[in-house]
Image (cartoon, helix red, strand yellow):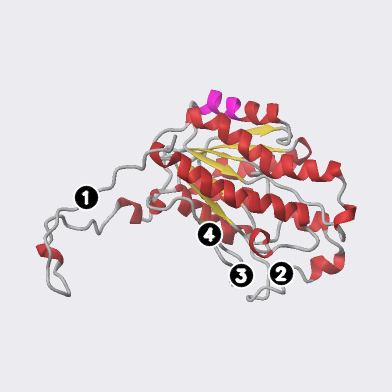
Amino acid sequence: MQKAKPKRRIHPARRQRPPGLEYKMKELPIFDSKALETGRKLEGKIALITGGDSGIGRAVAVAFARHGASLAISHLPEEEEDALFTKSYVESLGANCVLIPGDLSREAQCQRLVDKTVNQFERIDILVNNAATHIPQEKITEITSQQLRKIFETNFFSMFYIVQASLKHMKKGGSIINTTSVTAYRGSAHLLDYSATKGAVVSFTRSLAAALVDKKIRVNAVAPGPVWTPLIVSTMSRKQIATFGSDCPMGRAGEPAEIAPCFLFLASDDSSFITGQVLHPNGGEIVNG
């Protein structure tokens, strides 16, 4: 059965001659918004951020903390030291923060993550699906079935499971933000499986946005280009690290702090008329979509 389309807002008709005068309109356009204030945009909000211990996730946590959100941050057990630093940092900004370690490639841990967040904060207003990994391989024949499953379980299946578990705890005005990648648009010869998961994230974002529009929950994504994170120094050779990001138009890798404002924008009421979209902080690379 086809889902009914949301009711369209009908404006009272009163035609004018060009160029048109706003003061004569029967229903005046809204031209000012509290969202334009420079104050704390997420005051009182509860945000769950996966992979929030370091890199882009940490920068997003800090941005959210500066704007008044309370935070639940997931991380792998071996990332505890980074996670503790992030927790200490956001708490110094006045945010409440809980750390939830575990491997999100396991469905049960995705459910546990949501349960612990709700037990601590009672609800979820903002969900940031950011956790991901990659293992570069020169040839497709070098990607084992075990690696393929692990990359999809970590990068995509976890996102699906966490959304499923979170929706019952999200209300009107909620925001879901998924981290995809520039590789979803232009591909990557040495990251075939990773790029495939990021393409899936784009499609999932667009489809989920359509599915949740009636619930007034917005779903968007961010597709970073090269960004200086621990994943880079842990998966690339010294030569690759030395030149990382130099091939993008701006000639350098981005910093996590340069990516975080995209997430803040999509989490806040600044983006109240945006859903099903992808932002592209990638140093100037032109991509479709």
Q: Which residue is mark 4?
A: 279
Position of residue 222 in the picture relative to residue 154 (left or right): left
In depth, the one of 196 and 3 nearer the eye is: 3
* Secondary element type, mark 4: strand
- The residue carrying mark 2 is 245
* Amino acid type, residue under disc 2 in the picture: Gly
- Across and down, in percent, residue 237 comes to 86, 63
Q: Quadrant of residue 246?
A: bottom right
Q: Residue at x 26, y 57 (%)?
A: 32
| Disc 2 from disc 4: Cα separation | 18 Å
Residue 253 is marked as none
Does label 3 or label 1 sit earlier along the sequence?
Answer: 1
Q: Residues within 10 Å of mark 2 (few under 14, many from 20)?
A: many
Which stretch appears magenta?
114-121
Dot 1 or dot 2, earlier in sequence: 1
Marks 1, 4: nearer the viewer: 1
Query: Could one spot residue 185 in this view of the protein?
Result: yes
Question: Which amino acid does the dot numbered 1 rest on?
Answer: Ile
Badge 3 element: loop
Left or right: where does residue 193 sit relative to residue 110?
right
Which residue is pictured at 80% across the width and 45% down the height?
148
Structural distance between the alpha carbons of marks 3 and 1:
40 Å
Residue 288, picture quadrant: bottom right
Q: Residue at x 62, y 49 (%)?
A: 201
The answer to whether the residue labelled 2 contacts the one labelled 3, judged by CB atoms less than 8 Å apart, is yes
Question: What's the distance in space between the residues labelled 4 and 3, CA to CA?
Answer: 12 Å
Q: Main secondary structure of the magenta part?
A: helix
| For marks 2 and 3 on the same chain, the one whose residue lies earlier in the sequence | 2
